Image (spheres, helix red, strand yellow):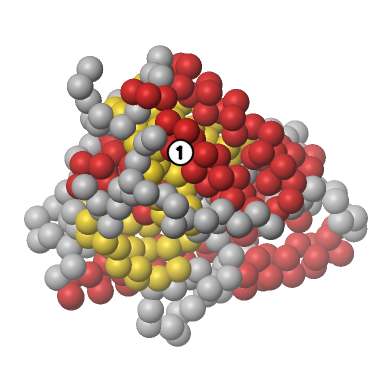
Amino acid sequence: VGSRLVLGIETSCDETGAAVLDETGFILGESLHSQKEVHLKTGGIIPTVAQRLHRENIAGVVQDALNKSGVAPRELTAVATTVKPGLALSLGIGLEYSLNFVKQHEKPFIPIHHMEAHALTVRMIQPVPFPFLVLLISGGHCLLAVARDVDDFLLLGQSIDEAPGDTLDKVARRLSLVKHPKCSTLSGGQAIELLAKEGNRLKFSFKTPMGQYFDCNFSFAGVRNQVTQVIKQKEEEEGVQQGGILSCVNDIAAAAQHTVASHIAKRTHRAILFCKERGLLPECSPTLVVSGGVASNQYIREILKIVTDATGMHLLCPPSKFCTDNGVMIAWNGVERLRAGKGIMTHTDQIRYEPK
Ligand code: KG4
Ligand code: ZN
């Protein structure tokens, strides 16, 4: 007892999450309600559906996290909630709930930036000092940034179209991998990683995007188009209807994964060289943190390891449980801000929730 306690609330996308953490990052209680299965059926997130599900689940999820922690609302030091970026309708539910909660229990409010929370989650597990380079790759995110302080991030690049997890999910859907006996329960990215192990990536060659751009941005739409073209062509050759499984599915998976991986690695390499040239990272043991759902891909990790070994960087991937959206990462960002005394609001009257 004596440690400050933070309740974190996340509703930016398709996970309703809450967690109670103490100042050391110890998780006293957490709760997560995922909407992923619902959205899978409609082939993507319908914002009004996401909003309704957040609304139905938010109170239960927060109560569950509090119950598990054994912490009463009056014992909390502050409430931290994702306020951006994300789906406006989804964010609105978490914000509305939180503003009512802090008013009722007279608690300070800490507004949280979802990407900053992802970037700093690693520090809950080990004390990585600032500054460090962070690569965030998931179904909804793709960016490279230097984390310089709790509230100071330098964005080096981001995707100009879609995120790599989204690309892999779409390719998997186009290959009908849910019907593949080995893949029925896997996410698109996981299915592609599994099949790629049995495939020969050299059977197809896809162009790595943006080689002509001297920046750290990403683009994956072109990769997806190239892969889709090949799938169409092979369907014709093999006389397979769209929706059927191609005999060369493993090779396509391997080549697609390789192209995504090498694009990510090339842009990360550029970012590392840029940071070194500008002195943006410490000379001694500079760190690359890789987070997000796609960071659990072993092939991508191996390629990134080649890049970090070649540039004298230390590669760190937090456990996948902490790479994905949840209340824990938001509560942790609240703890970081509380410790640093940054961004804590005792009057939330100026924050207005505008229902749409
Ligand atoms: O961070 P996350 O759980 O959620 C959002 O992005 O909202 O990431 C999910 C994404 C999905 O696109 C999924 O296909 C991808 O991460 N993913 C993977 C792997 N596991 C999950 N992609 C490649 N390889 C994996 N092993
Ligand atoms: Zn996220």
Where residue 41 sits: x, y (%)? 79, 43
Residue lying at 37% horizontally and 63% vertically, measured from the top left: 144
Q: Residue 34: image x %, image y %?
A: 62, 35
Residue in the foreground of this view, choosing between 220 and 325: 325
Which residue type does callout 1 highlight?
Lys
Note whether 79 is above or below 352 in the view shown. above
**Residue, x 35% and y 28% (percent of image)?**
76
Instruction: Tell me if 239 is positioned left or right of 310 in this view.
Output: right
Q: Could you tell whether 348 is left or right of 294 in the image?
A: left
The residue lying toward the viewer, choosing from 81 and 290, is 81
- The furthest residue to the left: 284
| 166 or 79, nearer to the observer | 79
User: At numbered mark 1, what does the secondary structure look like: helix, strand or loop?
Assistant: helix
Q: Residues within 10 Å of mark 1 (few under 14, many from 20)?
A: some
Task: Please indicate whether residue 111 sits to the left or right of residue 154 in the image.
Answer: right
| Residue 222 figure quarter | bottom right
Q: Is residue 131 visible?
A: yes
Residue ID for mark 1: 103
Q: Which residue, as the protein is rendered here, is positioned at the far bottom?
A: 212
Instruction: Look at 37% across and 36% down and name the residue there.
Output: 107
- Disc 1 under 8 Å from ligand 2? The reply is no
Using the image, determine if residue 336 lies above or below residue 208: above
In this rendering, the count of numbered labels is 1
